[in-house]
Amino acid sequence: HARRIEKVEKNVWIEFTRLAAEYKVVNLGQGFPDFSPPSFLLESMCNAIKGGSSMHQYTRAFGHPPLVRILAKFFGRILGREIDPMQEILVSVGAYGTLFCAFQALVDEGDEVIILEPFFDCYESMTLMAGGKPVYIPLKPHKVTGQSLTSADWVLCPEELASKFNSRTKAIVINNPNNPLGKVFQREELQMIADLCIKHDVICLSDEVYEWLTYDGAQHIKIASLPGMWERTITVGSAGKSFSATGWKVGWGIGPAHLLKHLQTVHQNSLYHCPTLNQEAVAVAFQREYDMFGTEESYFKQLPTLLQAKRLRLAECLKSVGLQPFMPEGGYFLITDISSLKVDLKDSSSKDETYDYRFVKWLIKEKHLGTIPVSAFYSQESRAGFQNYIRFCFVKDDSTLKAAEDILRQWK
Ligand code: PMP
Ligand code: GLN
């Protein structure tokens, strides 16, 4: 095998999705909705299928023209700038495809990439596969008194962040809202990152797949909208997350032509393009969202309203069994500290695994409840210090949440 795949063989999604299927769990693990996408999305796919023979053939490599045009219009309005649909957008196979193109296109052998812990795991493996060196900086929960813990309590130390930048730093990856914490970065935090990017001439990869999902009035700010950042930022989005259809695998990167053209080069020589039908259907759905933006009809408004209630429901249930959740300001997930639970895990065979991995496996096998260990979102070096948290996905039908509640309440 090639050296570039060393150190990336293990994958938390492969491992826990397999276990969840094997033990037929109530699944609050992998992040996907178990309810139907909105009917207008399904209609747009039906119409695309019947839309003529060209819908079943190749389309433009860097993005189906109707889709890149509406993405340019949509995000141009949000960013307050004209976006060139042909040169400043790449549509790829999910946010994963776009991120992969970005790492391959921009990170060279030996380049350093700053990654904020906890991080969506693929940033690390994609850095390694590109020959880069991940440099980690943790968000740390600062000690708060009282009961209401939120994802906003996880913060960066400004001096520590500054110390990570040097002449070998090529890029920093941020995930806003963050997976797994649900942290939505405040303007001052983004400005601190932006100032360092500008000072050290560093690229920012901003993964914003959960951009519409903010709660309790939290405001999502695009780092690309800060002065001096458009020129150095690739913003990544996902139709799967935007329209509750994670299996559709349509994602995009938006950024200045001088960077985007390199992502296009990787894409044309690897994936070539994302399926035409999916792109056509997503284009129609985005046009609808463009027309409805800010109104009660907008799915980008309805979905967070729906999830706000689900998130509260799960958090209340966790509290009632003595688990303290960090209330997420955004995204699909919430994490909770499990150190107060005294469980006899009985599995002497896997002592080399962190406590959260062993705990989640026990929860799956003994209680048939699926979650994800949070140390999976940390580097090898930092894992030991963060093995007392597990992640729950609350983007689930009420019947699934009810089934999870029954398990938690019976067991306590
Ligand atoms: N980024 C983050 C933060 C994610 O949680 C995910 C998982 N959905 C992705 C990217 C990948 O998105 P997609 O399914 O569009 O490839
Ligand atoms: N992004 C999803 C999550 O965090 C799943 C990613 C995957 O299954 N590869 O749960």
Image (cartoon, helix red, strand yellow):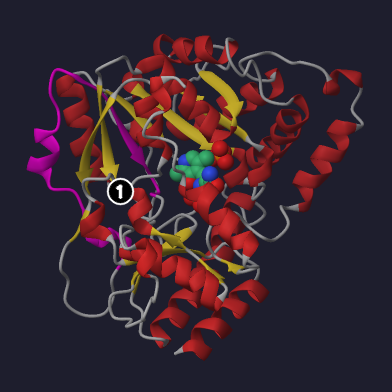
Around disc 1, counting alpha carbons within 10 Å, would you say few (fewer than 14), some (14 to 19), or many (20 or more)?
many
Residue shown at the point (54%, 47%) measured from the top left: 14
Q: Secondary structure at mark 1?
A: loop
User: Closest to the observer: 79 or 100?
Assistant: 100
Image quadrant in which you'd find residue 188: top left
- The picture quadrant where one finds residue 328 is bottom left
Could you say where residue 310 lies in the image, as x and y percent from the top left? 54, 70
Magenta stretch: includes residue 175: yes
Tell me the quarter of the image containing the C terminus. bottom left
What residue sits 16% from the left and 77% below the top?
A: 145
Up/down of 49 relative to 216, above or below:
above
Magenta segment range? 150-178
- Whether 235 is drawn above or below 187: the answer is above
Left or right of 224, for residue 214: right
Residue 203 visible within the image: yes
Amino acid bearing label 1: Tyr
Residue at the image point whose x is 21% and y is 80% from the top:
146
Q: Residue at x 65, y 42 (%)?
A: 289
Residue 367: in magenta span: no
**Tag 1 residue:** 378
